[in-house]
Amino acid sequence: FLLSYSCTLRLCYVTDASTIYVFCRYASSFYGPFREALDSNPRFGDKKTYQMNPANYREALLETAADEAEGADILLVKPGLPYLDIIRLLRDNSALPIAAYQVSGEYSMIKAGGALNMIDEEKVMMESLMCLRRAGADVILTYFARQAAAVLCGMGSAAK
């Protein structure tokens, strides 16, 4: 499917569209809050048939090679924080940009910890984003985008 999608775009002379491959989508419990909010938990079976085994890091290299051959423009690792090692592995083995998706479970843990005054939400948020970047992510997709932008522009809670 992804190959045909990429080929269709190119055959139609659509040259300014990138194809993001969600190839490193791990079978993860960190998707839980999103699935609960949308009531999208599997009704039968599970989604592991198309998600990668979290214990098998070698699979990421095999998938990367296949996705690059199919014309991927960006490689996406989802979820991000539990798979910093995979982000680094891909960064070291691919010339393509690496994106990390900080999923709902990662976001919810930080928000809950902040709401319970167990952590400094803003500092932990910024540290988590910095860790994704340090691991090798060129692009970070996060529910914290607006909050992080405010901090980076000096408008976060520390600036108040």
Image: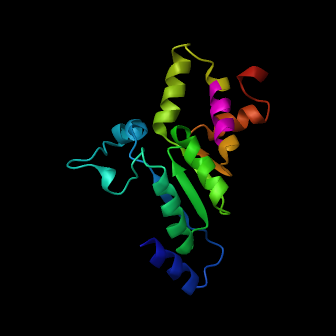
Taking the view exactly as shown, the residue that stands out farthest to the left is 44
Give the total number of marks visible in the rendering: 0
Q: Pick the residue in front: 32 or 79.
A: 79
In the picture, measured across the screen, residue 65 lies left or right of residue 132, that is: left
Quadrant into which the C terminus falls: top right
Q: Position of residue 58 (x, y in %)?
A: 48, 54
To which quarter of the image does residue 65 belong?
bottom right
Q: Residue at x 59, y 48 (%)?
A: 87
Q: Is residue 145 magenta?
A: no
Q: Is 131 a magenta residue?
A: yes
- Can you say whether 13 is above or below 36 in the image? below
User: Can see residue 78?
Assistant: yes
- Its colouring scheme is rainbow
Secondary structure mostly taken by the magenta-highlighted segment of the chain: helix
Instruction: Tell me what residue is drawn at x 79 percent, y 30 percent.
Output: 154
User: x, y percentage for residue 136?
Assistant: 67, 48
Query: For this rendering, which residue is in front, 120 or 135?
Result: 135
Residue 41, located in which quarter of the rendered image? top left
Is residue 160 among what the camera can see? no
Q: Position of residue 79 (x, y in %)?
A: 50, 44
From the viewer's perspective, is 30 left or right of 120? left
Residue that sits furthest to the top in the current view: 117
- What residue appears at the point 68 percent right and 43 percent down from the top-left corner? 133
Please give the name of the residue rendered at 66% of the width and 37% of the height, measured from the top-left corner.
131
| Image x and y of residue 17, in percent | 61, 71
Q: Residue furthest front?
A: 58
Quarter of the picture holding the N terminus: bottom left
Q: Which residues are magenta?
A: 124-132
